[in-house]
Amino acid sequence: MSRLTDHNVALAREIIVRYPRKKSALIPLLHLSQEQNGYVTDEAMRHLAELLNLTPAEVLGTATFYEMFKFEPVGTYVINVCQTMSCALLGAGKLMHHAEEALGIKAGSTTDDGLFTLEPAECQAACTGAPTLQVNYRHRYNVTTDAFDALIDDLRSGALSSEIPPHGTLGRNRQQIPADKFVGAPDPDDVSEGPAWVPVSSPANAMEDKS
Amino acid sequence: MSTAITRDYTPGFYEGDRPKLVTSRFEYEDSYTLERYLSTGGYDGLKKALEMGPEAMSGEVKASTLLGRGGAGFPAGVKWGFTPQGVWPRYLVVNGDESEPGTYKDRLLMERDPHQLIEGCLIACYAAGLSQCFLYVRGEMAVAHERLADALNDGYEAGYIGKNIMGTDFSVDVILHWGAGAYVVGEETALIESLEGERGMPRLKPPYFPAAIGLYGQPTIVNNVETLANLPFIAANGSAAFTAIGTETSPGTRMVAISGHVKRPGVYEIVNGTTTFRDIIYGNEFCQGIRDDNDLKAFVPGGGSAPWFVSDQLDIPFEGREASAAGSMLGSGAVMVMDSMTDIPEAALTLTRFYAHESCGKCVPCREGGTWLLRILERICSGHGTDADLDQILEVGQSICPGEMPHAASERIGLDATPFPYKMTTICFVGPSAYAPLHSALTLFRDEFEAKVVPAPKRISIPVAVAGS
């Protein structure tokens, strides 16, 4: 079942109407399909193409540009160990080496039990807590080798399952726009006038000063 | 009542007796909730803006000379003014795809004070007549997504976002959009491509200046998270209160992330234009010096793309023009410090690897050149490089950035500064960023590179007997 479920199709339709043009919803919907299946399946991409009036090739073309989309099954927990400058200065190489030994896999692969995927990563915007890693895109700071081992134990025992959802789930909540508050997203071709709060005579309509 | 900061979300955020324009709520545990926001002056700026009208509000922003905090440092009010007359609709795209190495401020602003950013977006939309706002957040920031989604849901519920905001005719949707992991999408035209559902590759400027031809070909304002987070303060207190802080050319405050070999790495809101690098690195209220009291070897002044500074530049203030004159830039406000124990070629390698990896592949000099530089550098660091490789780096670099390259002055090797910026053969700054830091490292610390290489093998001529001799 790798097409989107009925529940997710309903969610997808909610997301699509937020954009003036359908294709803009593609990346959010790829995330949605990854949340459902753990990775982006071929069937899901065909389904997204149907939903967005695209060809499957267009969906694949966009999806393959972005690193967060996986096209093969990955572990329940994807561990990204930062390798960029600030972390590298403070022992990211050593941490990565330890992670490989502790999990018994090389970076880029998945453990046999399907629990962990280990990846080298680029800057995670947590440089002051170097060295850092992310588990399913949730940060861990100042990670020592002992802290790494403890983290793996906690993940195995399920102690962190309320904090860290399985791979694919980006947020445990979603933006929800109440129907009566939603302004709407008309196609730009159908809009010719300025918004109501900008007086037609106003220089804001022209934004006079072009210096 | 102020409580301890959750270390989980904000490692190394330290308070101090400094003006706090955008981090004023960081001291509260529940800083991201609507209740806390409203009880600490939240949405007052929007209220003021709605009272004064869009023209007056955009006038205030222009008068504040608020400079963009994303990297280019362009005045926000002027940027808004570039939109062509009478073309509708116009969009606001918030650049929350922070991924410059060392940079770490937008994520905090989104996680710790999402309502402040949302209010800033609403003020911008109101002032510049933008009819829809897209909050493009880097995909790897799961917590920021959760906090922003909650904040938006609460904001819609309370009538601050959506139809007829606070009972006026001002109506705008703020849409939370997820990125999916690509550094180059932080470039504004690539961001727009990505938001249209395409591969995130930059567009050629001209003609694709977003203010004229942006999202769906419409006029589009792209602003950084920190830039927008300043708007509630400017709206509520007026531009004069903003320009009273900092200097004339760099008003207000800036969030600076300092990482690497310092005693107290952290994100600090500093007074713009007057705080020097020495204050930041050695100051008691900031980083308190280098780890183990080692000597400073070099530091990155403004994110991974910036040419490096050495101790000669410590007394330069955190001000755009001064940094340019000294041979680098302030970029996204990230300082990375290297102490005397640092292996300079290895450090340069981590940055070159980053930019080579993040090239989108559109421009040849970046796609091929970045990878080429990476291979040479890897060869040097693994002990297989030759002295010819050092010149090769400069030669490859010339095809990405032709002409003179900016670098800092160094008394140690008797070198004068060459001011920023450089020329470039690529559409965006990813390509030059693979080279500029490496070039400055190689210029300032050539001795360290030379220590790692062996002389290139000489061609040996073997005398050949000529027939008849």
Image: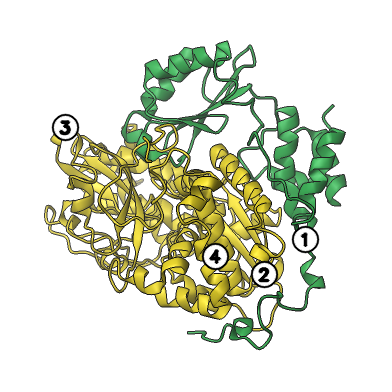
Q: Which residue is mark 3?
A: B292
Q: Are marks 4 and 1 on the same chain?
A: no
Residue in the picture at 60% in, 68% down: B125
Q: Which residue is mark 1?
A: A184
Q: Secondary structure at mark 2?
A: loop
Q: Secondary structure at mark 1?
A: loop
Distance (Cα) linking label 4 and label 3: 48 Å
**Chain that bears disc 2:** B
**Chain that bears disc 4:** B
Q: Are marks 4 and 2 on the same chain?
A: yes
Distance (Cα) linking label 4 and label 2: 12 Å
Residue in the picture at 34% in, 71% down: B243
Q: Nearer the viewer, mark 1 or mark 2?
A: 2
Query: Is residue B152 among what the camera can see?
Result: yes
Q: Nearer the viewer, mark 4 or mark 3?
A: 4
Residue in the picture at 52% in, 76% down: B58
Residue A14 place in picture, x, y as percent: 79, 47
Name the N-terminal-most of marks 2 and 3. 2
**Residue situated in front as seen by the camera: B387 or A118:** A118
What kind of residue is marked 3?
Asp
Picture colour for chain B: yellow
Residue B309 lies, with reference to residue A56, above or below; the image says below
Picture colour for chain A: green
Residue A163 lies, with reference to residue B232, above or below; the image says above
What kind of residue is marked 1?
Gly
Q: Are marks 4 and 2 in contact (CB under 8 Å)?
A: no
Q: Quadrant of residue A96?
A: top left
Residue B320 place in picture, x, y as percent: 32, 66
